[in-house]
Image (cartoon, rainbow, N blue to C red):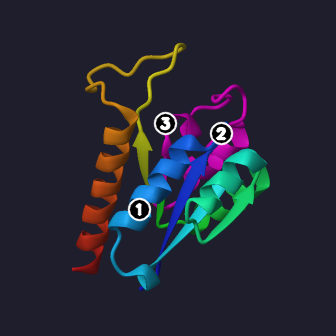
């Protein structure tokens, strides 16, 4: 059964690029998964597609339309916080991500205006590795 993995990122798309790179490196069964890049801006989308996403789209409507089709949604925690990423994440984007039936795997990046208490501070590369590891575990559980 084909699984759809959606990566959402904004700004320069650097987190999405790292997630896609690690997914391409670690996910077996290329034909079993489709990686879709959804950027809040064209630069983020372009960089994620170049990193290896199968397809990409940009903007609020792309996220509103595609998030509900995802089996898994990965991205920084800002994708569920309205007006985060310097305003690139709209309330409608957040609503789409939160209403989607797919499982969300979020990287708990710290921001100046809020704090996540009780989480171990990790470098971004380690968070990406853990997120992809969790996704691999979930995919294996589903296939059993």
Q: Is residue 80 above or below residue 144?
A: above
- Start-end of magenta stretch: 74-102
Sequence order check: which comes first, mark 3 or mark 2?
Answer: 2
Secondary element type, mark 1: helix
Q: Which mark is residue 80?
A: none
Sequence order check: which comes first, mark 3 or mark 1?
Answer: 1
Crowd class of label 1 (few under 14; some 14 to 19; many from 20; radius 10 Å): many
Residue under label 3: 77
Q: Quadrant of the N terminus?
A: bottom left
Q: Residue at x 54, y 51 (%)?
A: 17
Residue under label 1: 23
Secondary element type, mark 3: helix
Label tally: 3
Residue under label 2: 12
Q: Residue at x 37, y 65 (%)?
A: 25
Mark 3 vs mark 1: in front: 1
Residue 115: quarter of image: top left
Q: Position of residue 35 (x, y in %)?
A: 53, 68
């Amino acid at each position: 059964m084909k699984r759809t993995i959606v990566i959402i990122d904004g700004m320069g798309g650097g987190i999405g690029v790292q997630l896609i790179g690690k997914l391409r490196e670690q996910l077996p069964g290329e034909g079993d998964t489709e990686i879709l890049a959804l950027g809040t801006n064209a630069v983020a989308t372009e960089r994620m597609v170049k990193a290896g996403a199968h397809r990409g789209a940009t903007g609020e409507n792309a996220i509103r339309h595609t998030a509900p089709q995802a089996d898994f949604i990965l991205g920084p925690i800002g994708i569920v916080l309205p007006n985060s990423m310097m305003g690139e994440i709209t309330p409608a984007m957040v609503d789409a991500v939160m209403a989607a039936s797919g499982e969300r795997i979020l990287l708990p990046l710290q921001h100046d205006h809020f704090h996540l208490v009780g989480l171990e501070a990790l470098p971004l590369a380690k968070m990406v590795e853990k997120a992809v590891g969790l996704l691999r575990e979930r995919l294996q559980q589903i296939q059993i």
